[in-house]
Amino acid sequence: MVAIEVKNLVKSYGSIEAVKGVSFSVKDGEIFGLIGPNGAGKTTVLRVVSTLLKITSGSVKITNLDVEKDADKIRKIISYLPEDAGAYKNLTGRAYLQFIANFFDAKQNQQMIQKGIEIANLGERIDDRVDTYSKGMMRRLLVGRALMINPKLAILDEPTSGLDVINAQEIRKLVKNTAKKGTTILLSSHNMLEVEYLCERIALISDGRILEEGEPKTLMDKYEANNIEEVFMRVVQQ
Ligand code: ATP
């Protein structure tokens, strides 16, 4: 089944056309990555899919629900991790996860919090205030928050940004395992190695347009490239 269907999406901010007619679809349970340089339009696409931005034209459907007409229903089945997300600074990590879990079915609360704590993997620091966390610790807490709720679709904007190599690897494994359990993942990244490792399919986006799309291996064969970075350079130079 198709989890996300984006058709001819255009999004303008005043006179700036950030997304210029983007189409792609993501299958149920797939990890799909948008990669591209700064300002390419990745965050804009993710925010539209997350029902946070009004679209200028085109259509976006999540499991056949329309992002504009059915936004409330969609919000119940997705989880969005913004690129620059923060958490309430005067709460501890645990209290923050508790606070979020309280928005969901009380029966699942404890299980959710436990899962969030495991994903965040902050050890004893989970009981420290969020304002004492390093950038990477904060990111892990937020990834825990995004994935603990077992969303049908997780939208992750630069999930490993600011993380060191070991923590980034851990988060990638977690994202993979989450998809194996049935969550569809749409993510963005600048990190070409990351998308090559994580994503079943990718779209290369630049200046608001998708330049190429497919499985990493197929794209590497097509462009006779050793990695996605080389694919990207060749696509851009065309
Ligand atoms: P990055 O990798 O740097 O996060 P991105 O690929 O996520 O970039 P977007 O943040 O979607 O790109 O930005 C796409 C374009 O839209 C850029 O030209 C940006 O300046 C512009 N833009 C984004 N948000 C706004 C806004 N709120 N108002 C005006 N222009 C915006």
Image (tube, rainbow, N blue to C red):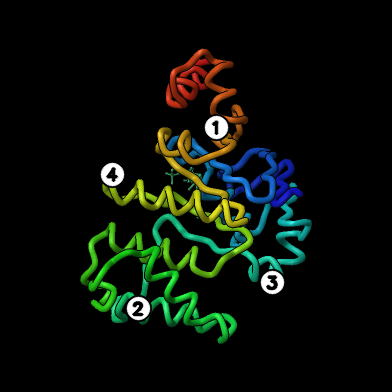
The residue shown at (67%, 54%) is 55
Which amino acid type is marked by label 3?
Asp
Of the numbered discs 1 and 4, the one sitting upstream in the chain is 4
Mark 3 and mark 4: span between their CA atoms? 37 Å
CB atoms at circles 1 and 4 under 8 Å apart?
A: no
Horizontal relation, residue 95 to residue 36: left or right: left
Q: Which mark is residue 87?
A: none
Mark 4 packing: few (<14 Cα in 10 Å), some, or many (20+)? few
Q: Are marks 2 and 3 in contact (CB under 8 Å)?
A: no
Residue kind at label 1, given as amino acid type: Leu
At label 2, which amino acid type do we have?
A: Arg
The span from disc 1 to disc 4 (Cα, nearest Å) is: 23 Å
Asked if disc 2 and disc 4 are in contact, CB closer than 8 Å, the reply is no
Give percent across and percent down for residue 207.
Answer: 53, 34
First reached walking from the N terminus: tag 3 or tag 4: 3
Front label number (2 vs 3): 2
Residue designated by label 2: 94
Rounded to the nearest angstrom, the CA distance separating label 1 from label 3 is 30 Å
User: Is the residue indicated by label 2 positioned so its CB lies within 8 Å of ligand 1?
Assistant: no
List the residue tagged with mark 3. Answer: 72
Element type where label 2 sits in the image: helix
Query: How far apart are labels 2 and 1 at the CA level?
Result: 37 Å
Considering only order in the chain, which callout, 3 or 1, is on the residue closer to the N terminus?
A: 3
Considering only vertical position in the picture, is 37 above or below 238?
A: below
Residue 181 in the figure: left or right of residue 92:
right
According to the picture, the residue beneath numbered tag 1 turns out to be 204
Name the residue that disc number 4 marks.
Answer: 165
